Image: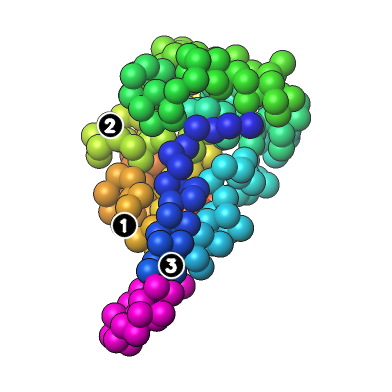
């Protein structure tokens, strides 16, 4: 499967580690001062360690595990994936809930191409990944703006949104959370996953991928409550903050 993320997200640290190491080696051979060699060696060491963290812990090119077993514990239902992108979250859902069906929605277009690269239409790339994962028979694809979803109120048993709503500004994020509540049946479940600078992410990326600025858990918790959700569980995992909530 190819999720189309930019090369620097997965392998950018190697592009730092190798030149720094080569320059340090060349400097050592030429007798440079230790005050020049020490920063180069430190940079190479950090970049190498960060690359290992990205590939072994954060793993952006791998389908993430569902952060809680509580979401859709019945294993079945009709679920909307808001901001499905190239399919990581849809595949996560359908693999772990084998009796569920999903509508994978996103605002496909130029911005989508810019974020996920090129190679056929956005919908085609998404469907290729769903077929490769063996879940395409339980998924449909829809073009939708998460701030104004083209679905009826109470249409879904569950909603998933992974690493999408935090791309919007505060107003847009709040609108998207309200729309998630609107399309859910009463008692329906919402699994919200957001990019979060937990320790692994801070070590590897610093502030580079702080989607939504520095909005933390209390801000998102407040938006969920205002939209009519009751938050039952929340937590963090590598690069991720998540909430499991029910519509009141």
| CA separation in Å, label 2 and label 3 | 46 Å
199 vs 206, left or right, is: right
* Mark 1 or mark 3, earlier in chain: 3
Which of the 4 image quadrants contains residue 96? top right
Q: Which mark is residue 207?
A: 1
Image depth: mark 2 or mark 3 in front: 3
Image depth: mark 1 or mark 2 in front: 1
Image depth: mark 1 or mark 3 in front: 3
Rendering colour mode: rainbow
207 vs 104, left or right, is: left
Q: Which mark is residue 22?
A: 3
**Quarter of the image where the N terminus is located:** top right
- Image x and y of residue 116, in percent: 44, 30
Look at 25% across and 37% down and name the residue there.
Answer: 169
Look at 35% across and 61% down and name the residue there.
Answer: 206
Q: What residue sits right under mark 2 in the picture?
A: 172
- Image x and y of residue 238, in percent: 52, 57
Q: Nearer the viewer, residue 189 or 130?
A: 130
**Magenta residues, start to end:** 25-45
Q: Which mark is residue 149?
A: none
Q: Nearer the viewer, residue 245 or 33?
A: 33
* Mark 2 or mark 3, earlier in chain: 3
Q: Main secondary structure of the magenta part?
A: helix
10 vs 79, left or right, is: left
Q: Height in image: 24 above or below 53?
A: below
Does dot 3 land on a helix, a strand or a loop? helix
């Amino acid at each position: 499967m190819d999720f189309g993320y930019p090369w620097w997200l997965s392998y950018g640290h190697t592009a730092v580690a190798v030149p720094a190491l080569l320059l340090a080696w060349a400097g050592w051979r030429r007798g440079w001062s230790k005050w020049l060699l020490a920063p180069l060696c430190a940079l190479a060491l950090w970049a190498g360690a960060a690359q290992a963290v990205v590939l072994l812990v954060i793993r952006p090119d791998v389908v993430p595990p569902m952060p809680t077993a509580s979401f859709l514990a019945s294993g079945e239902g009709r679920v909307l994936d808001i901001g499905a992108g190239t399919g990581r979250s849809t595949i996560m859902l359908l693999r772990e809930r084998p009796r569920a069906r999903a509508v994978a929605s996103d605002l496909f277009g130029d911005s989508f191409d810019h974020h996920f690269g090129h190679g056929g239409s956005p919908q085609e790339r998404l469907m290729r990944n769903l077929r490769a994962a063996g879940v395409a028979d339980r998924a449909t694809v829809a073009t939708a703006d998460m701030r104004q979803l083209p679905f009826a109120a109470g249409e879904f048993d569950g909603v998933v949104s992974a690493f999408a709503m935090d791309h919007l500004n505060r107003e847009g994020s709040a609108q998207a959370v309200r729309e998630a509540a609107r399309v859910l049946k009463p008692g329906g479940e919402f699994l919200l996953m957001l990019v979060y600078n937990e320790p692994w992410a801070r070590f590897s990326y610093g502030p580079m991928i702080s989607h939504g600025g520095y909005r933390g858990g209390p801000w998102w918790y407040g938006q969920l409550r205002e939209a009519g959700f009751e938050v039952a569980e929340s937590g963090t995992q590598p690069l991720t903050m998540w909430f499991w909530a029910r519509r009141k």
